[in-house]
Amino acid sequence: EDKVVQSPLSLVVHEGDTVTLNCSYEVTNFRSLLWYKQEKKAPTFLFMLTSSGIEKKSGRLSSILDKKELFSILNITATQTGDSAVYLCAVEASGNQFYFGTGTSLTVIP
Amino acid sequence: DVKVTQSSRYLVKRTGEKVFLECVQDMDHENMFWYRQDPGLGLRLIYFSYDVKMKEKGDIPEGYSVSREKKERFSLILESASTNQTSMYLCASSLKWVRLNTEAFFGQGTRLTVV
């Protein structure tokens, strides 16, 4: 059965810490992996990854995909309270199929 | 251990049918959401509810309605399904919004095909 698993389920860190969020998947006909940040109502798109080993960066956030080991990580350096959110991983497969993780809840304490 | 449950993983409906997508959460969350995910468009908010019998339109409410009669259940209704509503539908729930609130959970998604 196709699935996406995120870990940890929740995380509490102090401002300035670096965090790594994990997303592993078992999905047939993989096309891409997506990361979102859920704040309030609607998730904000962060990254789309399609190729192994190519790091994508946006400010303090970065992400990389390993298609051999079937996982992705999302790194956040020098965390701030504004990074507190739920981070959602999703995998797109062919045929417009999407599989979602349950999210990782990150709380950054001042 | 499942926290947000969507009633169906796959659905195939005919154009013009009335369709109900059900979402149930067991965490006593106040907020519940319905999104749709389409390639190249990301996750878009259809409707959300912040309490029983309360609802607000999201970014793309046209063609949809919702019902929240009980705190744990949030239903998405397609009054007359159309082919452009073929999509992946995702439900989520979260705690009432407070400072540093980060608890939210997502369902597994429902792939709806309208033929």
Image (cartoon, coloured by chain):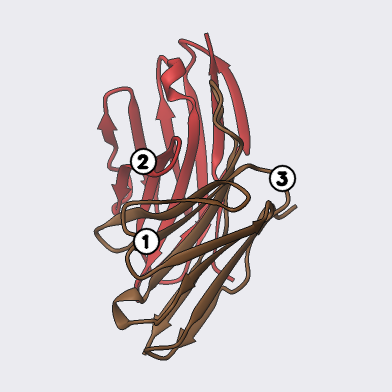
Reply above or below: A33 against B80: above
Q: Give the x, y percent position of residue B55.
A: 50, 51
Task: Report which residue position mark 2 lands on.
Answer: A64
The numbered dot on residue B37 is 1
Q: Give the x, y percent position of residue B101.
A: 56, 27
Along the polypeptide, which appears first: circle 1 or circle 3? 3
* SS at mark 1 in the image: strand
- Estimate how packed mark 1 is, as few (under 14), some (14 to 19) or many (20 or more) residues with alpha carbons within 10 Å: many
Reply above or below: B84 against A53: below
Instruction: Give the residue type that dot 1 points to.
Output: Gln
Reply above or below: B113 against A77: below
* Shade representing chain B: brown
Q: Is residue B32 left or right of residue A60?
A: right
Instruction: Give the residue type that dot 3 points to.
Output: Met
- Quadrant that contains the N terminus of chain A: bottom right
CA gap between label 3 and label 2 equals: 32 Å
Reply above or below: A90 against A60: below
- Estimate how packed mark 2 is, as few (under 14), some (14 to 19) or many (20 or more) residues with alpha carbons within 10 Å: many
| Chain of the residue displaying label 2 | A
CA gap between label 1 and label 3 equals: 24 Å
Task: Report which residue position mark 3 lands on.
Answer: B27
| Chain of the residue displaying label 1 | B
Q: Which chain is red?
A: A
Instruction: Give the residue type that dot 2 points to.
Output: Ile
Q: Nearer the viewer, mark 1 or mark 2?
A: 1
Question: Looking at the image, which residue is at 26% across and 30% down?
Answer: A58
- Pick the residue in front: A3 or B20: B20
Question: Looking at the image, which residue is at 31% across and 49% down?
Answer: A49
